[in-house]
Image: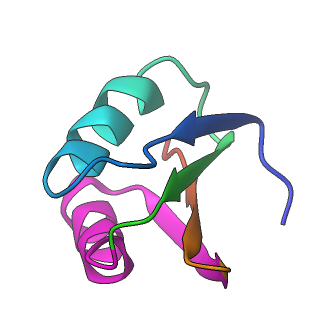
Amino acid sequence: MKSDEILDCLGLYCPMPIIETARKIKTLKPGQVLEVLADDQGIKEDMPSWCRQTGHECLGVEEDKGTFHVFVKKSG
């Protein structure tokens, strides 16, 4: 999946990947896609939940050798 920006949250644990995502997504334009890299398995449930609460769209989660690639489309 293609993204406009990448946010490296490797080594960070809940709730830091969500906090960093919330901070970074403010810098994107509506419709842009943020790819969040994380190695905390909680991201698989936390990010879709956060997206539902904030109105952003979780486009999917891909896993590659213990690294999760989470794609979030900014609302608006």
Residue depicted at 37% across the width and 40% down the height: 21
Q: Where residue 42 sits in the image (x, y, percent)?
A: 25, 76
Q: Where residue 66 sits in the image (x, y, percent)?
A: 56, 78
Q: Quadrant of residue 24?
A: top left
Residue interval drawn in magenta: 41-63
**Is 39 included in the stretch rendered in magenta?**
no
Q: Is residue 1 left or right of residue 65?
A: right
**Residue nearest the observer in this picture, 70 or 54:** 70
Q: Is residue 26 above or below residue 43?
A: above
Residue depicted at 21% across the width and 55% down the height: 13
Q: Is residue 1 above or below residue 66?
A: above
Q: Where residue 34 sits in the image (x, y, percent)?
A: 61, 44
Q: Is residue 17 left or right of residue 10?
A: left
**Residue nearest the observer in this picture, 30 or 13:** 13
The color scheme shown is rainbow
**Residue nearest the observer in this picture, 41 or 2:** 41
Q: Where residue 46 sits in the image (x, y, percent)?
A: 24, 71
